[in-house]
Amino acid sequence: MKKLMPFVALLVILGCAKQETPPSIPDHQMEEIISPNVYHFNIDENEINFEAVSLESLKSNSIATVTTRSNHPHSNGHFSAVDGAATFSYSVMQNNGGVHGHINMGGINWDMQLSSECIVVEGNNAVFAGQITDVTLIPSALEDQINSIPEFGGVIGTYIYLRVEDHGEGNNAPSDRFNNYYYISPEQFGPLCHLIPPNTSAWLPETVLDTDNESDQIQVSGD
């Protein structure tokens, strides 16, 4: 039986930021964010361990390792992982009218509804974010931590970022994959997918898992 990996997230708590984030930012011009305080934590049996992470390093990695990005990215999927302990159903699409879609994140002790807010596609990999609109269940350690940080202003409105990999279609295709590793940021700074695109070291390779399902559970496209 697979061992459930810790639920990992990163809180991006920024001293100040530009009030508007453009819908797309050239690869060589990342939006400046001043005096960031950045943390990641893992939740394992309701224990939280914090460690500081430099947002500047994430921005640098994003610039240094960028690949060709789609101008009309979209991704959708429905899959479970870690023996059903985590389930995801989502659709995220960006076009001239903006970003559209819906995300459901569920599992043994969590069930959250999110509106799709941003997406970056690089090759067959995607990072997308949803903004929490409704919560039925949430791990108590995560809820307590979010509520303890003034910048977040509560769970509703928080952004959650996910990364997925599309490994093709057909019976012989390998399993699609996702990162059991999550970023979160407060509502007031807007969606930040451009700071953590999929093909950077911001996403730890050791956190990538196969989905429980057969192949072709995740679709990623830039067409």
Image (tube, rainbow, N blue to C red):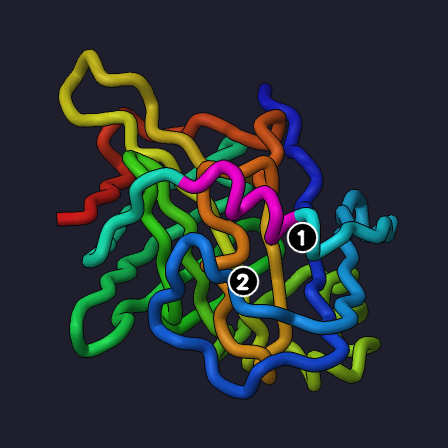
Residue 156 in view, yes or no: no
> In this view, which residue lies farthest toward the front?
28
Quick one: label 2, few (<14), some, or many (20+) residues within 10 Å? many
Residue 83 lies left or right of residue 101; in this view the side is right
Start and end of the magenta stretch?
A: 58-66
Q: Quadrant of residue 37?
A: bottom right
Quadrant location of residue 129? bottom left
Which residue is rendered at x = 75% and y = 64% of the image?
140
For residue 223, side relative to residue 39 (left or right) = left
Disc 1 secondary structure class:
strand
Q: Which mark is residue 117?
A: none
Identify the residue at image location x=22%, y=31%.
Answer: 216
Q: Which residue is mark 1?
A: 9
Pinpoint residue 103: horizontal percent, then vertical percent. 37, 63
Measuring 19% from the left and 58% from the top, which residue is drawn there? 72
With respect to residue 109, does 187 lie above or below?
Answer: below
Image height check: is 128 above or below 154?
above
Q: Is residue 82 above or below residue 127?
A: above
Question: Is 63 a magenta residue?
Answer: yes
Q: Residue 128: x, y in percent?
A: 41, 56
Find disc 2 in the rendering and name its residue: 160
Q: Report the residue at 70% width, 40% height from top.
A: 6
**Mark 1 burial class by Cα count in 10 Å: few <14, some 14-19, many 20+:** many
